[in-house]
Image (spheres, rainbow, N blue to C red):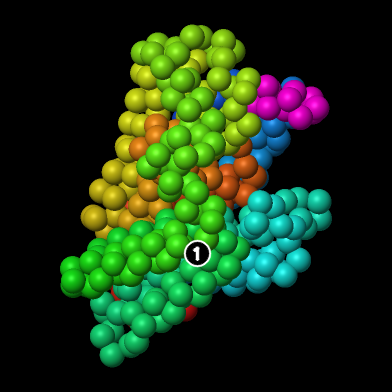
Amino acid sequence: MISRDQRTPFTEWWWTVDRVLLVALIALMLAGVILSLAASPPVATRIGLDPFHFFNRHVLFLAPSLIVLIGVSFLSPRQIRRSALLVFGLSVALIVATLLFGPEVKGARRWITLIGINIQASEIAKPSFVVLAAWLFSEAARRPEMPATSMAMMLLLTLVSLLVLEPDFGQTMLVLMVWGALFFIAGMRIVWVFGLAGVAAGGLFTAYLFVPHVAGRIKRFMNPASGDTFQVDMASEAFSNGSWFGLGPGEGIAKRNLPDSHTDFVFAVAGEEFGIVLCLALLALFAFIVLRTLSRAYRSEDLFSRFAASGLAILFGIQAAINMAVNLQLIPAKGMTLPFISYGGSSMVSLAYGVGMMLALTRQRPKTEVNAIEAAGSYA
């Protein structure tokens, strides 16, 4: 038993952290292990690797991810803000290095190799960006004389500009949606939210006109006969084959031909082998994590904790929704990982960092601690 009378950092963390949310996140990670074992062997075999190559690496990535998740959840709001500033600066530097020195794959530069490890810096930038934007919006609410909203806009333009240069329009739209949601949560007028939505729509239309692969994906979504829709067609077939209860573990057919069955289309493999029932259970688990975090954030008296936890939950939820919607052919195809389910080291570690901050910001802190934070007037 862990006694409340013991005054150690661990016992303080244990009695203040949302243990239900922690269990839900660990359950999601375990589901990712099972689905990686189901989806990745055919891909590895097809490209001449050991059948369990991607599965072994997926499990290997879990160790640092769990360390990051638990370690970050111990941090105070001030430490979270400082770490986010450091991580965001590092990720921006890595994105610039990627643009200069990263290999070009299918017309884009999104990866850079450091010490033998492939890193997608844009994944690392997202959670830290959300926290910094939340801090600026909280400062704008507390101190109207501070140009915090303008600084948040500059922060957005900096990251969006770098993402467009890669180019990575999927991540760009994700960042814009989360920033817009934070803008709205912070109490900004709805007309500004609609205005930003209009600017985003204009940017998407411009990309459609001048970026061939964006236009191609939208055209294939609107008219499947206009191009290659092999992967999304196979995903639809997988859901059809699986029906309600699936074909059984290891019995999937579509994964043998899906090039990205272990990453972008792992949700389709889940549908084929374990059925729509499991897919609905995964959807419910994602929804529970998001709604639980939003509920805890709403009860927080600290504006920064409220905004940051809400923004991180929205980031987590929208990313999951985009991946599942692509698998179900509800939106144009976009390479977006399913949190903790899809294979990917950069994605998994950055997600662990984000949900670790969610756990830290939703801890039940004593009233005296919240008052001390407010009295300090700054997290810097």
- In this rendered view, identify the residue nearer to me: 30 or 301: 30
Residue at the outermost left position? 190
In this rendering, would 245 be left or right of 343?
A: left
Question: Within the magenta stretch, is there residue 111?
Answer: no
Q: Majority secondary structure of the magenta segment?
A: helix
Where residue 301 sits: x, y (%)?
A: 25, 63
Decide: few, some or many residues near mark 1? Use Cα within 10 Å; few <14, some 14-19, many ≥20.
few
The image shows residue 196 at horizontal and vertical percentages of 30, 69
Which residue type does callout 1 highlight?
Answer: Phe
The magenta stretch spans residue 41: yes
| Residue under the point 53% across and 45% down | 335
Residue 378, relative to residue 193: is it above or below?
below
- Residue drawn at x 18%, y 71% as measured from the top left: 191
Which residue in the structure is indicated by mark 1? 210
The residues colored magenta run 40-50
Residue at the image point whose x is 33% and y is 79% from the top: 149
Whether residue 205 appears in this view of the structure is yes
- Residue drawn at x 34%, y 44% is 290
